[in-house]
Amino acid sequence: MIFMRYMMKLYISIVSLPDYLHISVICYTHINEQGRLMNNKNLIRYLAVCVLLCATGCHSYGPKSIIPDRFDYSAALAQSWKNQLVQNLVRMRYGGTPHFVEVSGILSQYSINTEAIGGFRVNADGVAGVTEVPFSISGSFTESPTITYTPLVGEDFTERLLTPIDPVTIIYIAQAGWPIDHLLELCVDQINGLRNHTIVSSNNIESTKAQAQDSEFVELVTLLKALQSQGMLDIRVEQSGRKLTLFLPPTKGTEAQNKMTMRLREILNLSQTDSEFILIQSSIQRSMDEIAMQTRSLLTMLISLSSAVEAPELHMEQNIVYEEALMRMPPSAKEKLLEIGSSKKPVKNVFVQIKYRNHYYYVKDEDEGSKRTLALITYLFNLQSRESGQMAPLITVPAAAPR
């Protein structure tokens, strides 16, 4: 005759969904009179495991979720913005209009529940001398993200895309260390009568005078870039009422640096002795103590940058690509500011890539000029909303304490 001294039944239940996980473990242990003492050690082990698992779930999940959630949401927002920007440029290349949808709120809720139940039953199932030790462990994890999207329309659209960039914004970005040549080539239409032909009208017929002004603008940008790289471009802005004063302190550098500074003032038609100049948003300079800067709007920049999208030959033959854009960039400017390639198949090692009309459009990861341009457009897009009272997306991540 064989006596059962020890018998255990184990039941495991797992329910897994995209945002829900539930695990349940139920164990029944039967010990008869002869095997009770022999299996006391095993019983203690099982109960210890039960207590340990339950205690593990009692720790707060909230603090642990902050780091991964913050970085995951930040990376997702940054990547989605790049995709949206490139998609709008590609859409405009095909004659479409830009559409922006903002993430105005992110609410992510977590719920963690753990439960452990244990006990003893003597003479289980009416059988004398048999002790039943049932215990169960269960736990569940639930995530419920809520993301709010806001389309850019009405006043917000006008404020961000149609309003010319504030000249002070350009100065502040330059002070932060952004390459001054890149800023002026993309954002400025003219300074003190010097026209920037990096972005021109498709109907514009460049005259001899216009070409001469363009060469002077190129010289201006070259001088500013040289002075900035040598640490000699010390510019600060003070605002008094509606008057913006731009300070250009006299250069105390080498003879070559002094010559560059004198030439800079000469090109801009500024006084060689004054150090304070009034910065205005205008196309006309009225005196030698003024810096009249006419800037571009983001929509003008986007229209011209869309011409940098490389359309497939098939689409060119089908005449579905928009070639008569109001603004365009010369080939030399495209190579410097932005290049968006196209391919029938996905491309590896890219900075950003989107799919449109069964083709893939991408910016190479090693293309520093294109990456800088996309970054600048992003900065300007966010800075343009400063007066509308909008804020960055509100991210709320409450984590419920385990029960």
Image (cartoon, rainbow, N blue to C red):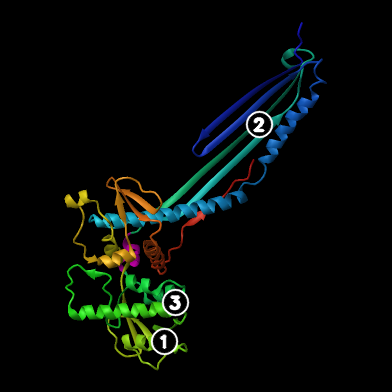
**Whether residue 86 is situated above or below residue 16 in the rendered picture:** below
| Residue plotted at (63% across, 28% down) | 25
Three-letter code for the amino acid on which mark 3 is drawn: Ser
Image quadrant in which you'd find residue 268: bottom left
Q: Nearer the viewer, mark 2 or mark 3?
A: 3
Assign a secondary structure to mark 2: strand
Residue type at mark 1: give it: Ala
| Residue 264 placement: quadrant | bottom left
Q: Residue furthest top?
A: 1
Q: Position of residue 101 (x, y in %)?
A: 37, 55
Q: Nearer the viewer, residue 118 or 290?
A: 290
In the displayed structure, would residue 141 be above or below residue 1? Answer: below
Q: Horizontal placement of 337 versus 395: left or right?
A: left
> Is residue 294 shown above or below 310?
below
Give the mark nearer the N terminus: 2 vs 3: 2
**From the viewer's perspective, is the residue at label 1 or at label 2 nearer?**
1
Residue 164 seen: no
> Can residue 55 be seen?
yes
Q: Nearer the viewer, residue 116 or 202?
A: 202
Label 3: element kind = helix
Lower position in the chain sequence, tag 1 or tag 2? 2
Is 152 left or right of 70, judged from the image as shown?
left
The alpha-carbon separation of the residues under discs 2 and 3 comes to 66 Å
106 or 207, nearer to the observer: 207
> Which label belongs to residue 229?
3
- Mark 1 sits on what residue? 256
> Which residue does the image show at 29% across and 88% down from the upper left?
286
Q: Specify few, some or many for label 1: CA neighbours under 10 Å numbering under 14, 14-19, or 20 or more.
A: few
Disc 3 to disc 1, C-alpha distance: 14 Å
The residue where tag 2 is placed is 137
Read off the magenta span: 153-162
